[in-house]
Structures are given as C-alpha cells and as structure tokens.
Image (cartoon, rainbow, N blue to C red):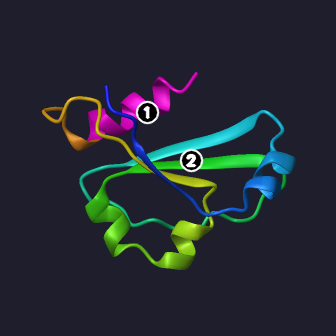
Amino acid sequence: MKKPVTYDFRDIAAADAARSGVALVTANFGGIDTILPFPPQRGIDAYYYTEARVLSKADAAAAASWTRVILPDYPRYDFGPRLRARYFKHQIH
C-alpha cells in the first residue's frame, strides 16, 4: 500500500505543542461537500481525508484551517464515496 499524500498546513513545532491526544477526523469523497474552515481549537488535531478534485476546488484558507488534509489512494476505488468516507472515520484507531 502506498503512503497517502498529505498536506500539513501548520508549523511543525506548533503542531507538536498543540497535540493532546484528541483528534477530529472527517472525510469527503465524491465532491458532495466543499472543505469548510475548521474553527481554531487548542489541543485538537483535525484531519480531513478527501480526493484531489475536492482539494483543487477548495478555498485555500479553509484547507489551511485543518491540521492536515490527506489525499489517500486507498481503500478500493470501486467503493462508493460514502463507503470510502466511512472507512476513514471508522478505521482511525
């Protein structure tokens, strides 16, 4: 399995200092929604799994508000958008 492409929009030192063991994970495939800004929350890492076409249409400021936007090349591409999104939400731990 290839390593997914990730975009880290925060300063690495600041990200390490902010980590508290709490993370929010969401996923959007199929272009159903746009990337919305994540309100600043101290001590919460926010991960957004999506595909390149969704990221390309996203507002740069909205994408930058997430700790990391990840463009995975898994799970299987024959899964529909809803099932692909659920995979990441349920397999995170």
Q: Residue 12's x, y, as percent?
A: 73, 55
User: Which residue shows up at 29% across the image and 39% down it?
Assistant: 73
Say whether residue 68 is magenta. no
Identify the residue position indicated by label 2 in the image. 47
Left or right of 61, for residue 45:
right
User: Which residue shows up at 46% across the image and 78% down it?
Assistant: 59
Identify the residue position indicated by label 1 in the image. 88
At label 1, the amino acid type is Phe
Q: Residue 45's x, y, as percent?
A: 70, 47
Q: Residue 14's x, y, as percent?
A: 81, 57
Please tell me which residue lies in front, 9 or 40: 9
Classify 47 as above or below 20.
below
Q: Earlier in the sequence, mark 2 or mark 1?
A: 2
Q: Which residues are magenta?
A: 82-93
User: Which residue shows up at 70% across the image and 65% down it?
Assistant: 39
User: Which residue shows up at 83% across the image and 49% down it?
Assistant: 18
Left or right of 55, for residue 31:
left
Q: Quadrant of the C terminus?
A: top right
Classify 39 as above or below 46.
below
User: Seen from this angle, which residue lies furthest left?
Assistant: 78
Classify 70 as above or below 93.
below
Q: CA distance from mark 2 to mark 1?
A: 10 Å
